Amino acid sequence: MELAEFTNEALMEIRVRPVERREEGRYQAQMARHHYLGALAKIGETVWYVAIWREQWVAQLSLSAAALKCGVRDRWIGWDFRSQYGRLNLIANNSRFLILPGWRRPNIGSRVLSLTERRVGADWRARFGHPLFLLETFVDPQRFHGGVYRAANWMELGLTQGYRRIQKGYSAEADGPKRVFVRPLRRDARAQLTHPDRDRLQLPGAPKIMLTAEQMRQLPQCFKTIPDPRRSQGRRHRLPVVLGIASGAILCGMRGYKAISDWADALGQQARERFDCRRENGRYVVPSEFVIRDCLVRIAPGALDRALSEWNQAWGAKEEALAMDGKTMKNAIDDEGRQTHIMSVIGHESKHCYAQKK
């Protein structure tokens, strides 16, 4: 359609819906080809959307997990790290937004964002079982001004500190701060996110555990009696440290090897020292996702359970003993041909599953 032909009436015909499974290949191919950051894997709580006009694809969006840390966002909400913990899944990050070639016309971007906002709350609850109160996004000021978000009534809060995620955590120096925009999905979003009554937030599962400094120090100690099944050659991280970090991540609600690795990467230098991490070039480093996976699948779940029980006797809640359980699923093969392993942290009394990872 020619630009002059695309009237306000035509704009009103645009619809937004989740991408169907059979369309995911097309979605990823177009994102990889046309978005400057490329395609993004679907990890954790993620919904992909497509905007359509008369069966033609107009734009693509990805909404996924919120940033673990964002100073200007957290100050605007009014929570600290402890109060936000376990509530980040009430925020979704607009991690990708692509207006497809040939469709960069006035008001299309803001129209697509507005339509997405109207339906994402219901979509999120239907898929993940909990509400959504806030959307966030980060805009590179060297490339964009964020005009499409302003036109859709998003609020600009300020700039990130500019530290980039790298393979071993975060970059040592600030590089390219991003503009932070947010869009509340309800008027009382901040009040809801900071409300002291967790039940009112309709969050699934039991409350997540928040580790103290001393708990971090003690977790690796509990695994010192477990023999290391790996060859001594090439070991960079001691087994108690790997298992301590993995257990800490699972106790804090992380699910899956990628989430555990991301949690470890997000640990600051002080927290890494408490876990007794290896020190390289003046900085503490955490084990990679491959190392964490390799250790967890080699260790007998019973040994992990006994070690965690020892930690729980000293540090767990008196009314709730925790057990770590694991099993290999027969005839369950993932996309890469590996057997599926399930590990869970379960309360003996309440039978709550605090966390489960595949």
Image: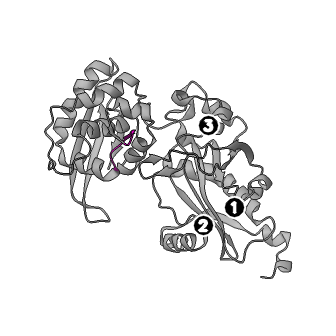
Q: Nearer the viewer, residue 152 or 199?
A: 152
Q: Nearer the viewer, residue 225 or 101?
A: 225
Q: Position of residue 104 (x, y in %)?
A: 75, 71
State which region is magenta. Answer: 281-288
| Residue 183 appearing in the image | yes
Q: Which residue is mark 2?
A: 36
Residue extending farthest front: 281
- As for residue 287 lying within the magenta part, the answer is yes
Q: Along the horizontal axis of the image, is 198 left or right of 133?
A: left
Earlier residue among tags 3 and 2:
2
Disc 3: CA contacts within 10 A as few (<14), some (14-19) or many (>=20): some
| Residue 208 appearing in the image | no
Amino acid at dot 2: Tyr
- Name the secondary structure under disc 1: loop
Mark 2–mark 1 CB contact (< 8 Å) = yes
Q: Position of residue 253 (x, y in %)?
A: 40, 38
- Which of the 4 quarters of the picture holds residue 335? bottom left
Up the image or down, 173 lies above or below 94; here it is above
- The disc at residue 143 is 1
Q: Residue at x 70, y 41 (%)?
A: 186
Q: Position of residue 149 (x, y in %)?
A: 74, 54
- Which of the 4 quarters of the picture holds residue 191? top right
Q: Which residue is mark 3?
A: 71
Q: Position of residue 185 (x, y in %)?
A: 68, 44
Up the image or down, 19 lies above or below 54; here it is above
**Majority secondary structure in the magenta region:** loop
Measured in 3D between alpha carbons, the distance from the residue under mark 3 to the one under mark 2, in whole angstroms, is: 25 Å
- Name the secondary structure under disc 3: helix
- Name the secondary structure under disc 2: loop
Q: Nearer the viewer, residue 91 or 282?
A: 282
Q: Along the horizontal axis of the image, is 18 left or right of 286?
A: right
